[in-house]
Image (cartoon, rainbow, N blue to C red):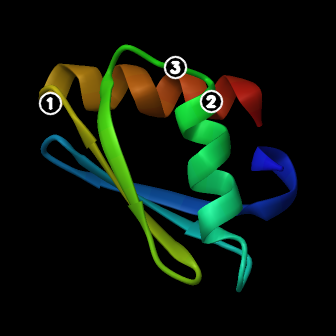
Amino acid sequence: VLKEGFVSMLSSGNLIVLRTVVGMAMAVAAAVDALELGEVIGCIAGDDTIMCATKGNEEAVILIDKIKEIM
């Protein structure tokens, strides 16, 4: 689900915004949550956008690298 729904990713501080295929944000957010990554505090999903909050700026960089590895 993560690979199929993912479109792009940007970060600002400890926040990461994931863009998805329209209608896939909830499924991709659930997939991110299921990975139980220690850097993630939580995710909020809309229709095609997910906001992921991380514990800090360094954790955001680590999370981006982990997501890139999965892709």
In the displayed structure, 27 sits above or below 41; it is: below
Q: Is residue 4 left or right of residue 31?
A: right
Q: Position of residue 19 (x, y in %)?
A: 55, 69
Q: In this rendering, which labeled residue sits more in front, label 1 or label 2? A: 2
In the displayed structure, 53 sits above or below 18; it is: above
Secondary element at image label 3: loop
Q: Which residue is mark 2?
A: 34
Q: Which residue is mark 1?
A: 57
Q: Quadrant of residue 58?
A: top left
Secondary element at image label 2: helix
The reply to whether dot 3 and dot 2 touch (C-beta < 8 Å) is yes
In the displayed structure, 57 sits above or below 8; it is: above
Q: Is residue 62 left or right of residue 55?
A: right
Query: What is the C-alpha distance between the residues marked 1 and 3?
Result: 18 Å
Callout 1 amino acid:
Asn
The reply to whether residue 49 is in sight is yes
Residue count near mark 3 (Cα–Cα under 10 Å), binned few <14, some 14–19, many ≥20 = few
Q: Quadrant of residue 14?
A: top left
Query: What is the C-alpha distance between the residues marked 1 and 2?
Result: 22 Å
Q: Which residue is mark 3?
A: 36
Q: Is residue 56 left or right of residue 38?
A: left
Q: Earlier in the sequence, mark 1 or mark 3?
A: 3
Q: Position of residue 15 (x, y in %)?
A: 23, 49
Which residue is found at the position 78% from the left and 62% from the top?
5
Q: Position of residue 21 (x, y in %)?
A: 74, 77
Query: What is the C-alpha distance between the residues marked 3 and 2?
Result: 5 Å
